[in-house]
Amino acid sequence: MNENLKHFLAGFDLAGKRLVSGKLLCYGCSDIELDNWPEEVTLFGRTYTLENVIKGVEGYESGVYV
């Protein structure tokens, strides 16, 4: 990532698939699971808060952080 762009970052999304077990599976990998979306995520020295969870089809979820 361009170092200058870090200063403009206002938020981001994390994507996963909700499994039958209730856990979230990371998209693009098969062995990283979360119990739920964390309330806060620190990235590049800044802390972002979970604003919304968007639910799609077939278990798709997106955690929106701002």
Image (tube, grey):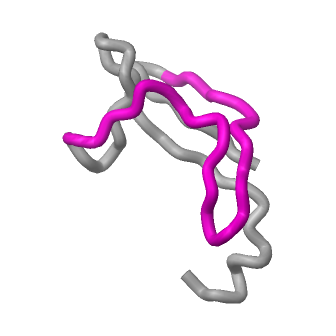
Residue drawn 29% across the image and 49% down it? 28
In the rendered image, residue 66 lying in the magenta stretch gets the answer no
User: Is 16 above or below relative to 4?
Assistant: above
User: Is 57 above or below relative to 45?
Assistant: above
User: Is 11 above or below relative to 61?
Assistant: below
Question: For this view, does 60 lie left or right of residue 30?
Answer: right
How many labels sit on residues? 0
Q: Quadrant of residue 37?
A: top right
Q: Observer-nearest residue: 38 or 62?
A: 38
Q: Main secondary structure of the magenta part?
A: strand
Residue 32, horizontal then vertical, whole percent: 29, 42
Question: For this view, does 63 lie left or right of residue 10?
Answer: left
Question: For this view, does 24 lie left or right of residue 7?
Answer: left
Question: For this view, does 40 lie left or right of residue 51?
Answer: left
User: Is 46 above or below relative to 62?
Assistant: below
Residue 49, horizontal then vertical, whole percent: 73, 43
Residue 4, horizontal then vertical, whole percent: 71, 88
Which part of the image, by quadrant, shows the N terminus?
Answer: bottom right
Residue drawn 42% across the image and 25% down it? 35
Residue 9, horizontal then vertical, whole percent: 74, 67
In the rendered image, residue 38 lying in the magenta stretch gets the answer yes
Q: Quadrant of residue 62?
A: top right
Q: Report the span colored magenta.
A: 31-56
Residue drawn 76% across the image and 49% down it? 66
